[in-house]
Image: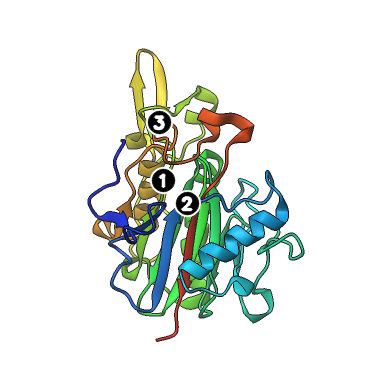
């Protein structure tokens, strides 16, 4: 998996490190991007990290002051972003949304940001209710059910029916490279039902590959399975079909270790 799928493309020839999804393109009320520009602030100078975030927001014509970021603890917590929580995590002076690996909002001009370096960054949009959500899903998040938690929260909070939603899955670890042990594979979800309208019973068996007695996990396939299990239509899920471990355009913790920078997904509603 070394090339973006045909339905993903660059925002423009002038932004070689920004990609967008056709599933979200053409919607004037929505702004989104996947980028390999490092927007993390934990490994670099904090002031420089904030300025990089400010610059990307400027490129997307989004307000940096309202940029909102979850803490990302490889858990299942999701949080609603309302008027009182805008701008959490935008810089070191504004703490992230504690305990959250997912965010959802109906607020306009509030960029939601998730970071990743092999985990799957996920964006969800309900065009009927004008609600958005993002999540950070590694294998622990898949096991814990962070995707189901996000879709359930959007349903309970904003009355979003999963069958009305569209989703995109950004760059993450692929089955070509992402070897896992039985300590991980034995925990992956088996067919379950979460009780949402249109939800079905889906497990992660199809996301596992066995080669030469070793097991490999496709995080994008696992994430897509969990989205479908939550009730999203198969044709409403777009995947940036690359593996962060072997595609050097993207950052990878598995390939680069602790010095790895971060990829990012940004999603926001725009007033139209």
The answer to whether one can see residue 195 in this image is no
Distance from disc 3 to disc 2, alpha carbons, whole Å, reads 17 Å
Q: Which mark is first along the chain, 2 or 3?
A: 2
Q: Which residue is mark 3?
A: 246
Residue situated in front as seen by the camera: 27 or 186: 27
Q: Which mark is residue 171?
A: 1
Q: Which residue is mark 2?
A: 121
Q: Are marks 1 and 2 in contact (CB under 8 Å)?
A: yes
Up the image or down, 154 lies above or below 191; here it is below
The answer to whether one can see residue 6 in this image is yes
Furthest toward the bottom, the residue is: 272
Residue 159's x, y, as percent?
A: 45, 77
Distance from disc 1 to disc 2, alpha carbons, whole Å, reads 7 Å
Residue plotted at (52% across, 63% down): 56
Residue 167's x, y, as percent?
A: 36, 60
Q: Are marks 3 and 2 in contact (CB under 8 Å)?
A: no
Quadrant in which the C terminus appears? bottom left
Dot 2 falls on a residue whose secondary structure is strand
Residue situated in front as seen by the camera: 155 or 66: 66
């Amino acid at each position: 998996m070394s090339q973006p799928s045909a339905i993903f493309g660059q925002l423009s020839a002038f932004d070689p490190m920004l990609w967008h999804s056709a599933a979200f393109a053409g919607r004037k009320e929505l702004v989104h991007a996947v980028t390999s520009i490092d927007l993390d602030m934990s490994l670099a100078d904090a002031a420089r990290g904030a300025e990089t975030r400010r610059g990307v927001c400027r490129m997307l014509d989004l307000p940096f002051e309202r940029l909102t970021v979850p803490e990302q603890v490889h858990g299942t917590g999701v949080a609603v972003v309302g008027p009182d929580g805008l701008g959490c995590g935008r810089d070191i002076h504004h703490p992230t949304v504690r305990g959250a690996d997912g965010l959802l909002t109906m607020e306009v001009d509030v960029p939601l940001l998730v970071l990743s370096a092999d985990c799957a960054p996920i964006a969800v949009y309900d065009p009927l209710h004008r609600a958005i959500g993002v999540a950070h899903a590694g294998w622990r998040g898949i096991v814990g059910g962070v995707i189901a938690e996000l879709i359930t929260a959007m349903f309970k909070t904003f009355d979003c029916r999963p069958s009305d939603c569209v989703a995109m899955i950004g760059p993450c670890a692929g089955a070509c490279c992402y070897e896992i042990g039985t300590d991980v594979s034995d925990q992956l979800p088996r067919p379950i039902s979460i009780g949402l309208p249109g939800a079905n019973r889906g497990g992660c068996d199809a996301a596992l590959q066995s080669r030469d007695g070793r097991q490999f996990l496709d995080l994008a396939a696992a994430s897509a399975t969990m989205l479908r299990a939550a009730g999203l239509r198969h044709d409403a899920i777009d995947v940036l079909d690359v593996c962060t471990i072997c595609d050097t355009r993207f950052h990878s913790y598995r390939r680069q270790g602790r010095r790895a920078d971060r990829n990012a997904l940004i999603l926001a509603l725009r007033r139209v």
